[in-house]
Image (spheres, rainbow, N blue to C red):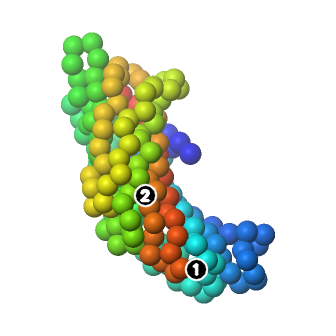
Amino acid sequence: MIALGIGSLSLVIGLTGTPASAASAAGEVREISIETKSAKEFDAVLKLTFDKPVTQGEADRIRQDMSKQAPVQMSKVEDYISCEGDLTRSNQHGTWTVQYVCFSGYGTIPWGFKIAPNVQAIAASNVTEDGLRWWRNGASMPKNAGHNVPAWYHFHGTMNPVYHYNTVQYQDYLTFRHNLGSGGTATLTFAGALDLLP
């Protein structure tokens, strides 16, 4: 999933349950997915898979607890970032920060992602980050290094090189064991895009 642009921040939550064929028995759930979309610019999905099915009631409670809206930072920033500019976007799953650092003839985009406290609280293991994948004007660029670290870690890296008037899209996957219900695996995906101006 790739969201386009960086615009003013709003929050839309989409919840999905496991199809009946994936549940062990009627009324049991093996997987839930909670999506937060901050307008066009930043999207995050938290997927929880359970080792043993949980009841529909427990799944609904977990959805409700994990979907509670954290304070959302509103911004009037247009859907671009200018040279030496920086942006911060937050939703209930985490906070994304990015800068556009310009040099003579090219630039870099240092970025960071911090998992939200409510998601950190369900982590029962280190978090394995796949490594940020990014595309410059649709062309795949070298992936950033992954990490295996505690949930409180500030994930970070650099998209390099970039140029004025590029569109940069990004996506990363974080995986960890969770302590909800019977326990299981959580996958947090975040994605978005930046339009770069001088």
Q: Write down the residue under mark 1.
A: 59
As measured in the structure, the alpha-carbon distance from the residue carrying label 2 to the one carrying label 1 is 26 Å
Residue 114: where, in percent of width, then height? Answer: 31, 55
Asked if one can make out residue 176 in the rendered structure from this viewpoint, the answer is yes
Q: Left or right: where does residue 30 sit relative to residue 108?
A: right
Quadrant for the C terminus, please. Answer: top left
Query: Could you say whether the residue bearing mark 1 is in a helix, strand or loop?
Result: helix
Amino acid bearing label 1: Ala
The disc label shown at residue 37, or none = none
Up-down relation of residue 34 to residue 85 (above or below): below
Q: Nearer the viewer, mark 2 or mark 1?
A: 1
Quadrant for the N terminus, please. Answer: top right
Residue drawn 49% across the image and 39% down it: 4
Q: Residues within 10 Å of mark 2 (few under 14, many from 20)?
A: some
The disc label shown at residue 10, or none = 2
Residue drawn 33% across the image and 61% down it: 151
Residue 66: where, in percent of width, then height? Answer: 45, 73
Q: Left or right: where does residue 40 sit relative to residue 110?
A: right
Residue situated in front as seen by the camera: 28 or 81: 28
Residue drawn 58% across the image and 79% down it: 59
Q: Residue furthest right?
A: 21
Residue situated in front as seen by the camera: 154 or 81: 154
